[in-house]
Image (spheres, rainbow, N blue to C red):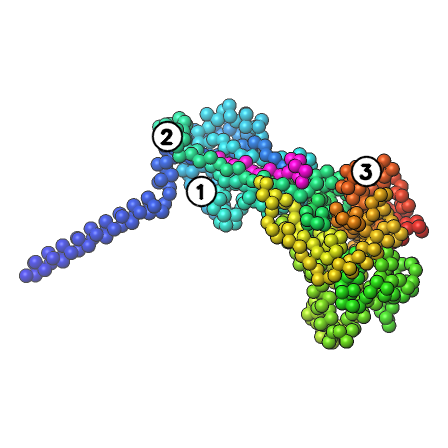
Amino acid sequence: MNYNHNFDNRRYFIAGAVIVIAFLFILRLFFLQVIDSDYKNFADNNAFLKKTIFPSRGLFYDRNNKLLVYNQPTYDIMVVTREVQSLDTLDFCQTLGISKEDFIARIEQIKDKKRNRNYSSYTPQVFMTQLTQQEYGALQEKLYRYTGFFIQNRTLREYMAPSAAHLYGSMAEVTQKDLDNDDYFTQGDYTGRSGIEKQYEEVIRGEKGYEILLRDAYGRIKGKYDNGKFDRKPIAGKNLKLTIDSELQQYGEMLMEGKLGSIVAIEPSTGEVLAMISAPSYNPSDMNGRERGKNYGALQRNPDKPLFDRPLMAAYPPGSTFKTTQALLMQQEGILSAGTSYPCNRGFAYGSHKLGCHEHPSPLDLPHSIQNSCNAYYCYALRNMLENRAKYPNIQTAFDTWKEYMVKMGFGYKTGIDLPGEKRGLIPNSTFYNKIYGERGWHAVTIISIAIGQGEVLATPLQICNLAATIANKGYYVTPHVVKAIQDTIVDKKYRTKNFTGIEPKYYDIVQEGMALAVTSGTATAAQLPGIEICGKTGTAQNPHGEDHSIFMSFAPRQNPKIAIAVYVENAGFGARYAAPIASLMIEKYLNRKIADNRKSKEEQLRKTIITPRGIKTYQLMDRIRLVDSTHVSVSGSDRVD
């Protein structure tokens, strides 16, 4: 009996071992055939080569259907590392113009699974990107010698003119984060890194295709597998029609040469951005090709920050352009009317608190306070609003009401433009001041400078231009946008929706009157344009690091406005000095399509003026402006400045 019992135990043990071994074999086969792709890749690569076909990236056109951005062919060298045999490394490196050390470093980088998580010795990997046609030609003649290497076609961005670099944006090789977040990408792919290229990446990149090529026993390509039955054609990316007027864009960049600052121009009725200039800029072609890294480093080290997108990212005190917002909201709240007058006496004085002003008639009513850009007028108005206990129970309620109007006018938050990187600026609320001073520690005079666009208030040039568009429209703005249509399909409806400020149109009439007076006989006479009624407002943004920034916002013509514009010239002093004449020329260029002969000298003088944090230099005397030295400009007595 014991013998039979032991035999039964052995039988069960052997049967169990067979089952376990069989299960392990099945598990291993499942891993090899389903989970691990290496053996499948090995088998496939012996017989096939799956070659990616990259789609043509969508083209950019301006609002007048002029081609702006297109594609040129370029070539990548791909390598299947397992197939690299008997390579004459020296000859290969000489053909490509690289060193042996560079070759070794590239191969090591490809095989490093920490940097290239999808590496497999059986699948094609990127060895070198963006060969020129000349490099491609030299390699193609010898490619048969270099087993394991082949050429893959791509496209490279090209530009009709060296302008609008910040707007178009740049391309860069995908990072591991890109690979993890988007299955579309593989190692060595390129993606939009900034500007329109980034914002509309999924629209303009298209869909990849591929072809399956048949190999012989020696790995040589013998043609398409099954006559291309399993190939897939790429789908080209969609073309974009931009809102930009390319002539106006290039003209604005010319005027801003040698200066720091920005210009933003918008069509008020549609919110379409006509021009968006950031100065200094760079040639967008410098951010393409194998020299991208070197060029990017040089731009990054430049103290004038040419990579900084000023229209979207620079937050300045809006200065006296902000007075228009105060005039509007305080009419709506019943604090001001067209006939309300306040004295100036060269500034606002309340106890020991004083804010200066320039010489002008006093007292002034509302339209003439805009014409003469009176600081005192708006300080008195803000004080009367914040201290009005018949209307507001406390200063916090009054101030939060003030803040709500500012937000409705497009300040304190992003405008929602279809570009990445936009900053929101700053519009404080009562909580902001409660934290600094305590609930009972602040009063109207504590924060009085915000009435004239100073203090804690910050705005981007885009927001100031949007304000000009809102005044032109008498109470609403359309969300700014730079893409008009995607492959002939008009953009999303949010870019056609009107955003209302809650202020009645009749109050905008009074502000428009003041802005028109400013141009004809006030602080903005430098913006005058014969035959066209311009409404404008000068401004000066305080700069603790040097000369103040020159600001001007305007729209034209007054009836049926076609263009709203904001100009910032850093370190250029009063708004009338440089920002206003630049805006005037931009308006003339857009509305008349040319500059009148009698204004060519002004154009030339502005173009030749160099303004940096280190001073102002000009090659010719400007109208009514005299160069005193490299850091100071005096203005003749006939000019009014804010």
Residue 184 x/y as whole percent: 49, 44
State which tag comes first along the sequence, 1 or 3. Answer: 1
Q: Quadrant of residue 444?
A: bottom right
| Residue 60 magenta | yes
Quick one: SS at disc 3? loop
In the displayed structure, would residue 358 be above or below residue 526? below
The crowd level at tag 2 (other Cα within 10 Å; few <14, some 14-19, many 20+) is few
Q: Residue at x 54, y 45 (%)?
A: 202
The crowd level at tag 3 (other Cα within 10 Å; few <14, some 14-19, many 20+) is some
Mark 1–mark 3 Cα distance, whole angstroms, equals: 59 Å
The crowd level at tag 1 (other Cα within 10 Å; few <14, some 14-19, many 20+) is some
Q: In the image, what residue type sits under mark 3?
A: Ile
Q: Which residues are magenta?
A: 52-67
Q: Which residue is mark 2?
A: 226
Q: Residue furthest left?
A: 1
Q: Is residue 503 visible?
A: yes
Q: Which residue is mark 3?
A: 595
In the displayed structure, would residue 391 be above or below residue 150? below
Q: Nearer the viewer, residue 150 or 168?
A: 168
Q: Residue at x 71, y 72 (%)?
A: 397
Whether residue 549 sits left or right of residue 133 in the image: it is right
Residue 518 x/y as whole percent: 85, 53
Whether residue 312 sits left or right of residue 602 in the image: it is left
Q: Nearer the viewer, residue 507 or 158?
A: 507
